């Protein structure tokens, strides 16, 4: 090892808080690290090179190249969820009623980042389950996997549905407030509270769990990970150019390349195969409306 590389090791970012990060080394030891300089440009899931600066602290020297990065981008800022993910679980519930626009945005962000995503419908024990299923029917029809759970009503059955998907993976769980994210984490990560406690203490960040992204190991062997991310209001997709949108939508994909114009926006052009599919009911009206809204949003200049 060169002199400059001495003492440098790789680690996994398991939590971030401003410029403060908690890094886990190969043995599972966790060390509080700062980034060099003012910029805090690493995110949970990053592999980093770091160096010990004192017994309990270290400095992050560099971030290893990422396999992927899931993020959202509004007019002003980019918000990263996590890096190097194997899977995204989008948790929705029978109640509170989910926003189809937010669901579609999450799916598009995952697709554009090259991350496999599954929809999970929770609280199927509630009377509105059939209505929720009906709202998700276009997703199932387009080949999107939709898992059904009752995390509270049937925890063991829910665990059996989830475990085969999560094995050996780093899975980010996204979902609006009240859908059962904490219930899911607590079911699959029996010592979740202890992991949060240990981390909060190390970062001296208090007991809050909802304001930062958190990496949990589901097993002692540290093979399966769940990543919990704080809730959000807006899911901006400014990272995507409007003409690319359709290529990230499973139900639009079969028709791409079939339109009369190669640069068809699928909004008003004659000979548009997407519009024909909408007319024929092969693309659902709600999905098409969301596409149209997103197109307008992504092609308008930022508001000042
Ligand atoms: N009926 C029913 N209720 C459930 C189920 N799973 C969770 N809940 C309830 O839904 C409520 C919200 O669950 P949480 O796990 O706290 O949801 P969360 O997504 O973590 O919500 P925030 O903490 O607000 O982000 C709680 O009262 C749970 O007991 C389920 O399968 N069926
Ligand atoms: Zn078209």
Image (tube, rainbow, N blue to C red):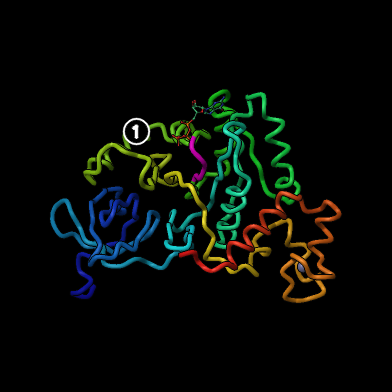
**Does residue 278 appear left or right of residue 6 in this picture?**
right
Location of residue 41 by image quarter: bottom left
Ligand 2's quadrant is bottom right
Residue drawn at 56 percent across, 52 percent down:
106
Q: Which of these two is toward me, 133 or 187?
A: 133
Q: Position of residue 225 (x, y in %)?
A: 44, 45
**Label 1: which secondary element:** helix
* Residue occupying the far left of the picture: 54
Q: Is residue 292 magenta?
A: no
Res 155 quadrant in image? top right
User: What is the span of residues highlighted in magenta in the rendered image?
Assistant: 173-177
Question: Secondary structure of the magenta portion, mostly?
Answer: loop
From this viewpoint, is residue 70 visible? no
Q: Label 1 neighbourhood size at 10 Å, few (<14), some (14-19), many (20+)? A: few
Residue at 52% x, 53% y: name it.
235
Percent from the top left, x then y, of residue 259? 80, 71
Viewer can see residue 118: yes
Q: Position of residue 218 (x, y in %)?
A: 43, 39
Q: Is residue 40 left or right of residue 188?
A: left
When the figure is inspected, residue 143 is found, relative to residue 74, above or below; the finding is above
Image quarter in which the C terminus is found = bottom left
Quadrant in which the N terminus appears:
bottom left
Q: Position of residue 222 (x, y in %)?
A: 40, 45
Residue, disc 1: 193
Residue 100, above or below 34: above
Q: Nearer the viewer, residue 59 or 211?
A: 211
Question: Which residue sits at x=57%, y=33%?
Answer: 96
């Amino acid at each position: 090892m060169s002199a400059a590389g001495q003492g440098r090791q790789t680690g996994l970012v398991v939590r971030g808080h401003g410029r403060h990060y908690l890094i886990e080394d190969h043995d599972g030891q966790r060390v509080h690290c700062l980034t060099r300089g003012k910029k805090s440009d690493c995110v949970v899931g990053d592999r980093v090179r770091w160096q010990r600066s004192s017994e309990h602290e270290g400095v992050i020297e560099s971030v290893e190249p990422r396999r992927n990065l899931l993020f959202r981008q509004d007019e002003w800022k980019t918000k990263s969820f996590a890096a190097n993910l194997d899977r995204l679980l989008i948790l929705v519930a029978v109640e509170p009623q989910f926003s189809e626009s937010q669901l579609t945005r999450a799916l598009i962000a995952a697709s554009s980042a090259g991350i496999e995503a599954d929809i999970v419908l929770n609280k199927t024990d509630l009377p509105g389950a059939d209505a929720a299923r009906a709202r998700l029917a276009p997703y199932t029809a387009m080949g999107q996997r939709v898992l059904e759970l009752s995390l509270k009503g049937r925890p063991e059955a829910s665990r059996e549905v989830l475990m085969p998907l999560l094995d050996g993976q780093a899975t980010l769980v996204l979902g609006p407030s009240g859908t059962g994210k904490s219930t899911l984490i607590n079911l699959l990560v029996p010592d979740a509270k202890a992991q949060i406690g240990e981390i909060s203490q190390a970062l001296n960040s208090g007991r809050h769990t909802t304001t930062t992204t958190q990496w949990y190991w589901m097993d002692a062997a540290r093979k399966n990970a769940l990543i919990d991310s704080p809730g959000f209001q807006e899911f901006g997709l400014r990272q995507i150019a409007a003409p690319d949108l359709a290529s990230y939508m499973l139900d639009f994909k079969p028709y791409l390349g079939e339109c009369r114009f190669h640069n068809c926006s699928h909004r008003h052009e004659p000979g548009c195969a997407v519009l024909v599919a909408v007319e024929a009911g092969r693309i659902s009206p709600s999905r098409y409306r969301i596409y149209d809204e997103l197109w307008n949003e992504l092609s308008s200049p930022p508001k000042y």
